[in-house]
Image (tube, helix red, strand yellow):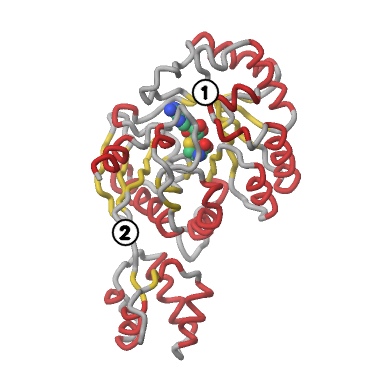
C-alpha cells in the first residue's frame, strides 16, 4: 500500500527535485519551473503553478506538501523595529526581527526553536531546545522580512544576521542549506557578504565552516577572554576552552581570509576589571578582529547589570589604544522585547501554557 505520509517538497534540493521529475518521466526543465515557483515566486499551492500540467500537479499533490511559516503576531517598536512571532507548521513558535537604520535594513533570524546552550544572560536559554529549524523555515523568515521591508520602508532587505533564537552551528546543515537558498540567483540572490552568522563558539564547527569555504561573516559571542569567567556565564564553554576557540579561528582566518567580530557585553562586577580588558586585548591581538560592545538587555536576572557608560568607554579607549577596531552597538526594539537575548518571552509564555 502506498504511504500516506507526504514529504515536504521544500526540503528537496534542486538536484533531488530533478531526480524526482525524471523518475516520473517528466522533463528536467519542469523541475526547474516548480523550483522557481517555490523559491523565487514563493507560491505555496501546486494549483497556482500554472505552467505545470494538471496531471503533473496531481502527482505532486499526492506525494508532497508545501510547508510554510505564518506570521502569528507582528509588533512594531517606536524605533521602527518589527518583531515577528513566527508559527511553524507544527505550531511551534520562533521569532525574527526587522531592524531598520538609515543605511541598512537587517533581518535578525532564528535557527532553532529554543536553544541547546546555557548562556545565563540570554532569554532563549530559558527554553530548552525543542528542534532545529528546517532550511525552508529559516529562508521563509528572510522572505517575510524582505516583504515587510518593502511594505514599510520601500526598500529591500540589505543584511541578515543569525542572532535570533538558537545556536546556528548546532543546526549546521540546515543553516548552510538556507544560506545557499538565500544567496543563489534562482532564489533571493543576496550576497553572502551581507550575512553574518553569530555563534557562541563551537571550535569543531568553526573549522568545518572554514573547510566549507563559506563566504559569509562570522561573529563570536565572546563576553570574556578569561576562561574561568566565561565558564561561569556560559557554562557549556567548559567543553570548548578559549584556546580551542582561538585555534579554530586561526584556522578560519587561514582558510577564508576573513577577520572575525567579537561580541562583548560588559557587566558590572563580572567582566569589568582591568584584568578583563587586558585579557580581551591579548585575545584580539592573536587574530585580525574587531570588537562589538553590545548593550545588555535585561532579562530579569539581577546577577547581570550592564556596566556604566564610563566603564564601557574605558574599555573602548583601551581597545583603541591597542589598535583594535571597536564599535558600540545600541539596542533596538527594547520596548517590544525584540532586542538580542530577549527573544523568548512570548514563546516562554506559550510553552508554559501548554
Ligand atoms: N547562539 C548565537 C546566536 C544567538 S545570540 C550566539 O550566541 O551568538 C545573538 C547575540 O545576542 C549574541 O552575541 C549573544 O551573546 C547576544 N545576547 C544574548 N543575550 C543577550 C542579552 N540579554 N542582551 C544583549 N545581548 C545578548
Mark 1 Cα-neighbour bin, 10 Å: few <14, some 14–19, many ≥20: many
Residue 248 image point, x, y percent: 70, 41
Which residue sits at x=47%, y=76%?
17
Residue 265, numbered label: 1
| Mark 2 lies on residue | 89
- The quarter holding residue 250 reads top right
In the rendered structure, the answer to whether residue 33 lies left or right of residue 47 reads right
Residue 161 seen in render: no
| Quarter of the picture holding the C terminus | top left
Q: Is residue 104 left or right of residue 61?
A: right
Residue 262, image quadrant: top right
Q: Residue at x 51, y 53 (%)?
A: 175
Mark 1 lies on a secondary structure that is loop
Q: What residue is at 28 percent from the left and 74 percent from the top?
A: 48
Q: Is mark 1 within 8 Å of ligand 1?
A: yes
The residue lying toward the viewer, choosing from 311 and 111, is: 111
Nearer to us of marks 1 and 2 is 2
Q: Is tag 1's residue or tag 2's residue first in the polypeptide sequence?
A: 2
Q: Is residue 347 above or below residue 286?
A: below
Amino acid at each position: 500500500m502506498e504511504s500516506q505520509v507526504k514529504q515536504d517538497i521544500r526540503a528537496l534540493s534542486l538536484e533531488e527535485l530533478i531526480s524526482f521529475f525524471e523518475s516520473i518521466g517528466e522533463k528536467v526543465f519542469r523541475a526547474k519551473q516548480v523550483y522557481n515557483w517555490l523559491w523565487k515566486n514563493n507560491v505555496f499551492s501546486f494549483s497556482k503553478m500554472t505552467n505545470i500540467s494538471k496531471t503533473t500537479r496531481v502527482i505532486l499533490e499526492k506525494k508532497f506538501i508545501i510547508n510554510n511559516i505564518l506570521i502569528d503576531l507582528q509588533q512594531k517598536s517606536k524605533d521602527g523595529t518589527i518583531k515577528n512571532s513566527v508559527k511553524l507548521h507544527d505550531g511551534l513558535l520562533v521569532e525574527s526581527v526587522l531592524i531598520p537604520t538609515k543605511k541598512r535594513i537587517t533581518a535578525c533570524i532564528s535557527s532553532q526553536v529554543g536553544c541547546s546552550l546555557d548562556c545565563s544572560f540570554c532569554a532563549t536559554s530559558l527554553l530548552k531546545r525543542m528542534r532545529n529549524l528546517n532550511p525552508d523555515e529559516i529562508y521563509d523568515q528572510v522572505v517575510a522580512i524582505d516583504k515587510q521591508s518593502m511594505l514599510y520602508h520601500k526598500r529591500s532587505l540589505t543584511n541578515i544576521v543569525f542572532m535570533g533564537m538558537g545556536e546556528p552551528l548546532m543546526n549546521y546543515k540546515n543553516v548552510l542549506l538556507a544560506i545557499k537558498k538565500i544567496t543563489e540567483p534562482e532564489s533571493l540572490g543576496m550576497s553572502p557578504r551581507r550575512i553574518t552568522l553569530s555563534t557562541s563558539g563551537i571550535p569543531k564547527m568553526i573549522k568545518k565552516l572554514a573547510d566549507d569555504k563559506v563566504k559569509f561573516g562570522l561573529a563570536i559571542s565572546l563576553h570574556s577572554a578569561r576562561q574561568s569567567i566565561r565558564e561561569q556565564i556560559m557554562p557549556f564553554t567548559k567543553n570548548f576552552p578559549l584556546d580551542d576557540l582561538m585555534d579554530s579561528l586561526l584556522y578560519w582566518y587561514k582558510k577564508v581570509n576573513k577577520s572575525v567580530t567579537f561580541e562583548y557585553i560588559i557587566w558590572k562586577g563580572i567582566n569589568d576589571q582591568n584584568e578583563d580588558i587586558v585579557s580581551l586585548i591579548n585575545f584580539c591581538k592573536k587574530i585580525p578582529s574587531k570588537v562589538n560592545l553590545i548593550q545588555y538587555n535585561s532579562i530579569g536576572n539581577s546577577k547581570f547589570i550592564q556596566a556604566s557608560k564610563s566603564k564601557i568607554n574605558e574599555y573602548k579607549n583601551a581597545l583603541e589604544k591597542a589598535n583594535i577596531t571597536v564599535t558600540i552597538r545600541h539596542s533596538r526594539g527594547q520596548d517590544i522585547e525584540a532586542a538580542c537575548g530577549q527573544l523568548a518571552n512570548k514563546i516562554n509564555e506559550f510553552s508554559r501554557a501548554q
